[in-house]
Image (tube, rainbow, N blue to C red):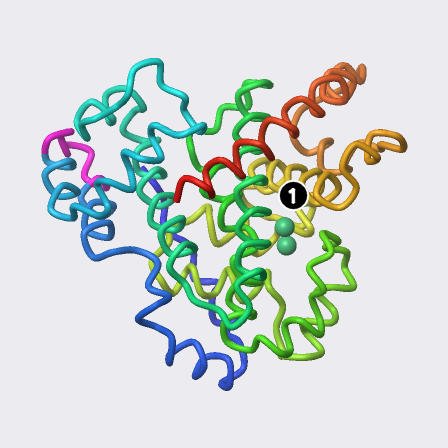
Amino acid sequence: MIATMPDVDANLKPPAKIVQALKKRVGQLQMLPVVAQEALQIVKDPQCSISQFTNVVKRDVKLTGDILEMANSALYCPVTPIVDLNRCVMRIGFRECQYLILSASVASLMHRVTMTQEWVRENLWLHSFTTALLSTRINRAFHLGFQGEEFTAGLLHDFGRLLIAVVDPETFLKVDPLGYDESPALLDREFDAIGTDHCRLGAWFTHSQQIPNPIPSVILNHHQPELAEEHQRLTALIAVADQLANDWQRLGDRMLEEFTPPSALSLLADDENGAFVASFTEVFPTLLAESHRDAEAMMAAK
Ligand SMILES: [Fe+2]
Ligand SMILES: [Fe+2]
């Protein structure tokens, strides 16, 4: 079951100007369809059956289609197509399906949100998909034990950047050159310009939209996983994938020439003899190239 976020949102509320601007776009920025909210609510009951769950979801034909599309994508690569929601739950698992609902809803939102500069949306979307797919590949390759939350968190980690681009496109382009370089200076520039940064804004907004923890918590700390008081391993995984996705998107193969392992790796696994980092360094280029390729394919299919 997905937990709800503790009451930490009060300190994260952005300045009134941003809240007002978001309210104007609220229809377009609705993250979870009503049916998705209902489905996530009923699975909190431990007695909830698969058919109860799927009967609720099936009331929303668009949501059902989005879930099945994602279940058949490079995320799961099923050997035979998954054409039915009940089979989807049985194949993927109840817990992972809850995150599939979140991911499918978010992917749909990213697709339909309009911007004055479309290339900004495309750029942020590709980075989000690459980070999400890489998080999942790292999770599977190193048996980290996450069950879908890593994909959703990867997809949403920079949602605050998308929000800034939507409500204040001019300021966004001044502070965020979309150069795949999310250094601390980016957060400082955002804060100076609009009174919040994309981590705080994304965490506050997703929480206000009923996106359950661990997602808002990961969004809040994805630039400083060492400060995360909860969900630190998941936050570290997203930080690692985020950094590698940025390096790959900025430098391509050149990133391998002077590669230093991301510092957040040390939060992911006990590594007394260095075997984890050595193994990671060996396999990540393949995982990264596959993730970027699949991210482009998933976007093109939309
Ligand atoms: Fe970020
Ligand atoms: Fe990022």
Going 73% across and 16% down the picture, which residue do you hit? 279
44 within the magenta span: yes
- Placement of the C terminus among the 4 image quadrants: top left
Of the 4 image quadrants, the one containing the N terminus is top left
Q: Say whether residue 5 is magenta.
A: no
Residue at horizontal 73 percent and vertical 72 percent from the top: 189
Of residues 27 and 195, the one drawn nearer to the viewer in this rendering: 27
**Image x and y of residue 268, in percent:** 65, 30
Answer left or right for 164 relative to 9: right
Outermost residue toward the right?
Answer: 258
Tell me the element at label 1: helix
Q: Which residue is mark 1?
A: 242
Label 1, ligand 2: CB separation under 8 Å: yes
| Mark 1 surroundings: few (<14), some (14-19) or many (≥20) residues within 10 A | many
Residue 300's x, y, as percent? 46, 42
Decide whether the magenta segment is chiefly helix, strand or loop: loop
Amino acid type indicated by mark 1: Asp
Q: How many discs mark residues in the rendered view? A: 1
Specify whether 67 is left or right of 113. left
- What residue is shown at x 10% (from left), y 38% (from top)? 55
Tell which residue pokes out farthest to the front in this image: 300
Q: Is residue 145 above or below residue 229?
A: above
Q: Quadrant of residue 139?
A: top right
Q: Quadrant of ligand 1?
A: bottom right
| Magenta span | 43-51
Residue 24's place in the image compared with 133, above or below, is below
Query: In the displayed structure, does residue 102 sit left or right of residue 65?
Result: right
**Residue at (45% x, 27% y) in the render:** 74
Residue 216: horizontal and vertical position, in percent?
48, 54
Nearest the eye: 18 or 253: 253
Provide residue 11's location: percent of width, then percent of height.
53, 71
